[in-house]
């Protein structure tokens, strides 16, 4: 009969993985991406450096996975753990888009998301593979939520049927991303509302 008190390697690995996630996110927030090293992550997480390299090829890969996990946890908390991530469809497209853009502004202004996001965006410029993975695993799934909601708007007659939905969603998310990345002006709820209103005016059905 197996000893039920024997250590469970699966649980131990999961604890180590989560400790590494937390360490990577904390270090990037505290000292910046450039000064964050695999050695520092390992020391903060209480694991050996070889443990990290067994699971990830670089610190960028560690940070990406940690950030994806953080984003998933935040989305689950927002919908009560149901796992139904998406843009609401209340029948009022303008209100639904203002709601999600305001939530995006709040996330962009949250240091827990802001600093890791900037680190990944910067590293993705010089590391094309990491940048592509960041876009594929995080950005593209989020953009597809806009595609789904805008297509529902087309079916409801709230959005012109002849538009390119991909271009339309970029009218919504592009301005927020630009202001966040370039720090041109404050990123506020009022700005999010203005972006939604201006974008929708251009998407409205023609008489």
Image: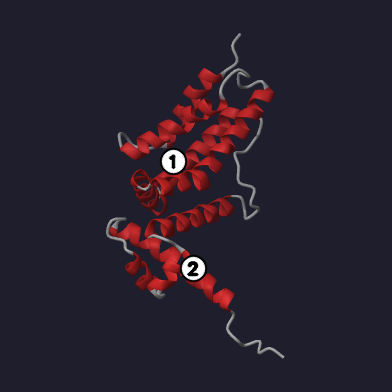
Q: Which mark is residue 17?
A: 2
Residue name at image x 66 percent, y 90 percent? 3
Task: Pick the residue in front: 51 or 94.
Answer: 51
The percent position of residue 108, horizontal first and vertical second, equals 41, 44
Q: Is residue 174 visible?
A: yes
Q: Which mark is residue 105?
A: 1
Task: Pick the residue in front: 19 or 93.
Answer: 19
Furthest residue to the right? 1
Quarter of the picture containing the N terminus is: bottom right
**Secondary structure type for disc 1:** helix
The percent position of residue 175, horizontal first and vertical second, equals 41, 31
Q: Are marks 2 and 1 in contact (CB under 8 Å)?
A: no
Left or right: 2 as drawn, with respect to 125: right
The percent position of residue 114, horizontal first and vertical second, equals 38, 48
Quarter of the view holding residue 73: bottom right
Dot 2 or dot 1: first in sequence order is: 2
Quarter of the view holding residue 203: top right
Residue name at image x 35 percent, y 65 percent? 38
> In the picture shown, does residue 52 fall above or below 108?
below
The percent position of residue 101, horizontal first and vertical second, equals 49, 36
> In the picture shown, does residue 189 fall above or below 47?
above
How far apart are the two marked residues, 2 and 1, measured between alpha carbons? 29 Å
């Amino acid at each position: 009969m197996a000893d039920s008190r024997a250590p469970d390697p699966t649980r131990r690995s999961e604890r180590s993985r989560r400790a590494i996630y937390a360490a990577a996110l904390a270090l990037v927030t505290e000292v910046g991406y450039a000064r964050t090293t695999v050695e520092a992550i390992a020391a903060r997480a209480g694991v050996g450096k070889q443990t990290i390299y067994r699971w990830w090829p670089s610190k960028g890969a560690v940070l990406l996975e940690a950030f994806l996990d953080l984003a998933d946890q935040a989305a689950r908390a927002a919908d009560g753990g149901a796992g139904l991530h998406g843009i609401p469809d209340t029948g009022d497209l303008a209100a639904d888009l203002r709601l999600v853009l305001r939530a995006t502004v709040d996330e962009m202004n949250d240091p827990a998301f802001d600093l890791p996001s900037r680190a990944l965006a910067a590293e993705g410029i010089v590391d094309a593979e990491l940048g592509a993975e960041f876009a594929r695993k995080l950005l593209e799934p989020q953009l597809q939520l806009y595609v789904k909601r805008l297509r529902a708007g087309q079916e409801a007659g709230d959005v012109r049927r002849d538009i390119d939905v991909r271009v339309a969603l970029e009218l919504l998310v592009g301005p927020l991303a630009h202001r966040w990345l370039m720090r041109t002006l404050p990123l506020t709820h009022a700005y999010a509302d203005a972006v939604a209103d201006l974008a929708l005016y251009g998407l409205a059905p023609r008489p």
